Amino acid sequence: MSRLAIVAAMHDELRAVLQAMPDEVPRVRAGREFWVGHLDGHEVVAVLAGIGKVAAATTATLLITEFQVDRILFTGVAGGLGEHVRVGDVVVADGLTQHDMDASPLFPRFEVPLTGVSRFVPDAALSDVLWRAAQTVLAEAAGAQGEHLDGARLRAFGITAPRGHRGLIISGDRFVSTQNESEALRQALPEALAVEMEGAALAQVCHDFNVPCAVVRTVSDRADDAAHVDFNRFMAEVAAHYSLAIVRRALRLLAA
């Protein structure tokens, strides 16, 4: 039987997944709790990624080498960069780049040295499943029909018609929280839809091990001067519910 990893970026998201797993058992490696069990008929390992690229890379490596997972789904929050990307929207990655990778002039900016790669491409089939799952969940959210979504909760954050986006997500070891920073990123990487701190590192590890991965992010802010406002409340009341709903919908599609 195949084993799928569900990697969450924040505690609230992991907690929501674990509450839906009937038989999770923790195993500790490198100071991390990897929860082995089942979710909706799939054998899964759920784990908190940790914050930043190194933490995410360590987590992905352990999942592959110690727990023999053969697919990885990563879910978390991100700051919106694309012009039409709003709080409450969801972005599924078609590519992942480390925006703080710069070994120029020895190598082109953003290229990971000695790999020839600046944009790591998630698995197309797995990303398609996440995209379909996200579209369904967002439609339910817009109509306040979802199993895990509360329309009043969404409206409290000004979310009335959440949309899905698919494209480039960028990662770096910095919480982007000023208008100047986000504008600089838009100038350097105009295709970028969202910015976060882990996805590109996880994708690089999966590339090295030839393990399929896919990344989905809920937009919690616009990566500007108000990025810190109500972040923890958004995580608990919106993002965690999005993550669980999208992951469970994706598992149903994988089983179909």
Image: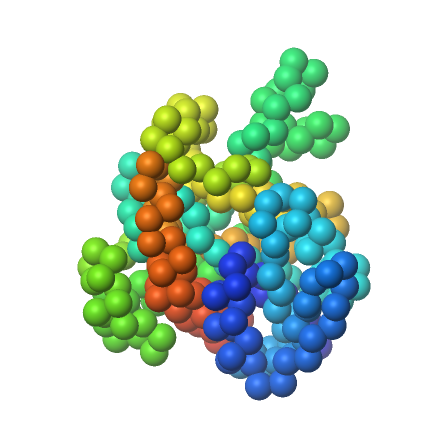
**Residue at 56% across, 81% down:** 21
Q: Is residue 133 visible?
A: no
**Residue at 27% across, 72% down:** 150
**Residue 139 in the image, given as x and y percentages of width and height:** 28, 65
**Residue 209 in the image, given as x and y percentages of width and height:** 74, 50
Asked if residue 126 lies left or right of residue 85, the reply is right
Q: Is residue 100 visible?
A: yes
- In this view, 211 is above or below 84: below
**Residue at 33% across, 36% down:** 225
**Residue 184 in the image, given as x and y percentages of width and height:** 41, 25
Q: Based on the displayed image, in which of its 4 quarters is residue 53 positioned?
A: top right
- In this view, 103 is above or below 61: above
Asked if residue 7 lies left or right of residue 163, the reply is right
Which residue, as the protein is rendered here, is positioned at the far top? 105
**Residue at 41% across, 29% down:** 181
Question: Relative to the observer, which residue lies in front, 64 or 26?
Answer: 26
Tell how many labels: 0
Q: Based on the displayed image, in which of its 4 quarters is residue 7 positioned?
A: bottom right
- In this view, 65 is above or below 107: below
Question: Relative to the observer, which residue lies in front, 41 or 176?
Answer: 176
Question: Relative to the observer, which residue lies in front, 25 or 96?
Answer: 25
